[in-house]
Every structure is written in structure tokens, then in C-alpha cells.
Amino acid sequence: MEQVLASRSVSITELKRSPSAVLEQAGLEPVAVLNHNRPAAYLLSPQVYEAMLERLNADLRVAIQEGIDSGPAIPAVDLLAELNARYAEPNGELAGETRRERAT
């Protein structure tokens, strides 16, 4: 059985029957929408959804900055040349690569 990641849950039937009541009762809490007792979706208030997106964006900015701070970038051309030198077959093709794939 799948884990329900919300303290509130509602069946799809109940949600269809009275969506306004479900939203009103939920308040700021997430609601698991269940189909045959399995999570089919989660309802989030606009405030919770916005906060979640802000957190994801902040985490992404931190990860990007950590990548920048980790050292100098390697130009793609240099990286591809190194990979080609390391993994090229005697005929000049990369392992597993066909001439047709290389031409595109």
C-alpha cells in the first residue's frame, strides 16, 4: 500500500460531491485525494504551493551557487574531446556510437 503523505484525506467521490466543503475543511493543510484507498493526487492551498515553489527555487539557487563555487568550468568542447580521446574506438567512433548518430 502506498504511503499517504498528508494528515487529511478524501475520496475522489467525496471531492466530486462537495469540493468547496473539502477545501474549506482543509484550510492550509494538504489533502490526499484517494482512489481505491491509494493517493491519486494532493490538494494544496495557494499559500502552501507558493511556499513550496519558493523553497525549491531557493534550494536550486544554492545548488547552482555551490556548483559555481566548486571550481572553474570546463568548456564543453574540451570535455567532449577528452571523452572522445578516452573512449574512442580505433575507427574514431565513440563506443556504441554509429556513423549515422555521429552525423546528426
Image (tube, rainbow, N blue to C red):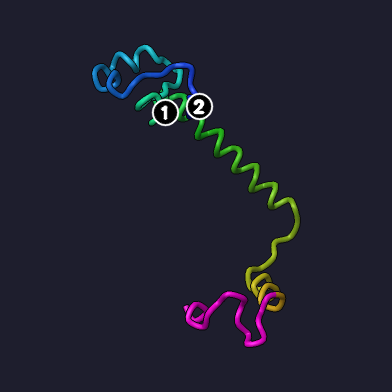
Please provide percent x and percent y for residue 85: 70, 78
| Label 2: how many Cα within 10 Å (few below 14, some 14–19, many 20+) | few
In the structure shown, which secondary structural element does the residue marked by tag 1 occupy? strand
- Report the front residue among 4 and 21: 4
Labels 1 & 2 near each other (Cβ < 8 A): yes
Q: Residue 33 lies in magenta, yes or no? A: no
> Which comes sooner in the sequence, label 1 or label 2?
2
Q: Residue at x 56, y 33 (%)?
A: 55
Q: Quadrant of residue 43?
A: top left
Seen from this angle, which residue lies furthest front? 1
State which region is magenta. Answer: 87-104
Q: Quadrant of residue 42?
A: top left
Q: Which mark is residue 1?
A: none
Q: Which residue is mark 1?
A: 39
Q: Residue at x 46, y 18 (%)?
A: 29
How many marks can you see? 2
Q: Which residue is mark 2?
A: 3
| 74 up-or-down from 67: above or below | below
